[in-house]
C-alpha cells in the first residue's frame, strides 16, 4: 500500500551507506529526485555512517549488509544504544537467511536489490511511519532464537561477560548491585539454556558469528 505524504509533512531525512560507488550514486540520485525525501549524507563505510548520524539528525538509514569494516549487524547493534538513532533499512541481495538476520539484528526493514527502485522508496516512507517491512519470514523461528528473547540489559550483560568481566566488575560497570547482577545472570542462563558463565560466553560467540556478514 502506498503511503502518501501531505504538503505539510517535512521531507524524510535519509542517509545512505554502501561501499559500491555506483550503487551509492544511483540511490543518491533517486532520493534527490523525490520531494518526499531529503538526502542528509552518504558514506562508503559503517564507521562513516555512524559518525554522521551521531552528529546530524537522520530519520532513515539505508545500508548495505556488507559495509566495511563493522558490517551491518554490528552497526545496527551500536545504533540500538543511541537515543535518537535512525531506523535502518537493509538494502541488499536477498540471499539465504539475510532478511531474518537483518530483522534479528534490529533493522526496521529489508529491501531486496532485485525489486524496483520505487519499492525501496515506498519502504522508506513506511518505515518513517513506524512500520516494519520484511519479506515473508517464519516469525515462530525468530521467536525461538534465544538471543531474540533477551532484554536489552541481558544483551549488555552477555556482551560484558564475553569480555571476561567478573560479577564485581559487572556491578561497577553497569552501576547495579551484586544481587541485581546475579538476578540478571540467572535469567540469562535460563533463557539461553546454559548452566554457567563459560557456556553463556560460548553461546554469545556462536551467535555473533551467525550475525556476521556473509
Image: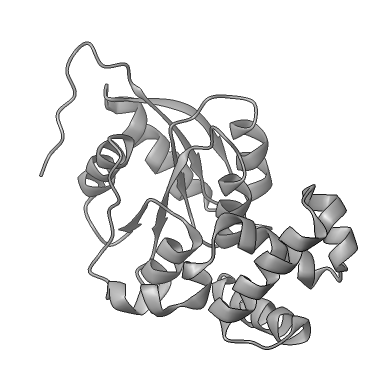
Q: Is residue 138 above or below residue 41?
A: below
Residue 88 is left or right of residue 44, and the answer is left
Q: Which one is in front, 175 or 124?
A: 175
Q: Is residue 116 above or below residue 178?
A: above
Q: At x 47% / y 44%, what residue is drawn?
A: 24
Q: Which one is in front, 154 or 112?
A: 154
Residue 195 is left or right of residue 83, and the answer is right
Q: Position of residue 72 (x, y in %)?
A: 55, 58
Q: Is residue 29 above or below residue 182?
A: above
Count of numbered tags = 0
- The quarter of the picture where residue 68 lies is bottom right
Q: Which one is in front, 40 or 182?
A: 182
Q: At x 45% / y 77%, what residue is drawn?
A: 145
Q: How are the colours assigned in the image?
A: one colour
- The quarter of the picture where residue 182 lies is bottom right
Q: Position of residue 16 (x, y in %)?
A: 48, 40
Q: Is residue 60 visible?
A: yes
- The quarter of the picture where residue 27 lies is top left
Residue 34 is left or right of residue 99, and the answer is left
Where, quadrant-wise, is the C terminus in this rendering? bottom right
Q: At x 77% / y 51%, what residue is drawn?
A: 176
Q: Residue furthest front?
A: 179
Q: Position of residue 53 (x, y in %)?
A: 59, 33
Q: Residue furthest left?
A: 1
Where, quadrant-wise, is the N terminus in this rendering? top left
Q: Position of residue 158 (x, y in %)?
A: 69, 68
Q: Is residue 158 visible?
A: no
Amino acid at each position: 500500500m502506498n503511503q502518501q505524504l501531505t504538503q505539510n509533512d517535512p521531507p524524510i531525512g535519509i542517509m545512505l551507506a554502501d561501499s559500491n560507488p555506483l550503487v551509492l550514486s544511483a540511490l543518491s540520485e533517486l532520493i534527490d529526485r523525490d520531494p518526499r525525501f531529503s538526502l542528509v549524507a552518504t558514506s562508503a563505510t559503517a564507521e562513516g555512517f555512524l559518525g554522521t548520524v551521531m552528529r546530524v539528525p537522520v530519520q532513515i538509514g539505508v545500508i548495505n549488509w556488507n559495509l566495511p569494516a563493522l558490517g551491518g549487524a554490528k552497526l545496527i547493534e551500536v545504533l540500538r544504544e543511541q537515543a535518537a538513532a535512525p531506523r535502518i533499512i537493509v538494502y541488499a541481495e536477498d540471499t539465504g537467511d539475510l532478511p531474518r538476520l537483518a530483522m534479528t539484528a534490529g533493522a526496521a526493514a529489508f529491501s531486496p536489490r532485485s525489486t524496483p527502485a520505487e519499492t525501496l522508496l515506498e519502504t522508506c516512507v513506511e518505515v518513517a511511519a513506524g512500520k516494519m517491512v520484511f519479506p515473508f519470514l517464519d516469525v515462530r523461528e525468530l521467536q525461538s532464537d534465544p538471543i531474540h528473547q533477551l532484554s536489552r540489559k541481558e544483551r549488555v550483560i552477555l556482551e560484558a561477560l564475553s569480555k571476561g568481566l567478573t560479577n564485581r566488575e559487572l556491578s561497577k560497570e553497569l552501576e547495579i548491585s551484586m544481587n541485581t547482577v546475579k538476578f540478571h545472570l540467572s535469567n540469562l542462563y535460563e533463557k539461553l539454556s546454559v548452566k554457567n558463565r563459560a557456556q553463556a560466553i560460548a553461546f554469545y560467540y556462536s551467535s555473533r558469528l551467525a550475525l556476521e556478514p556473509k
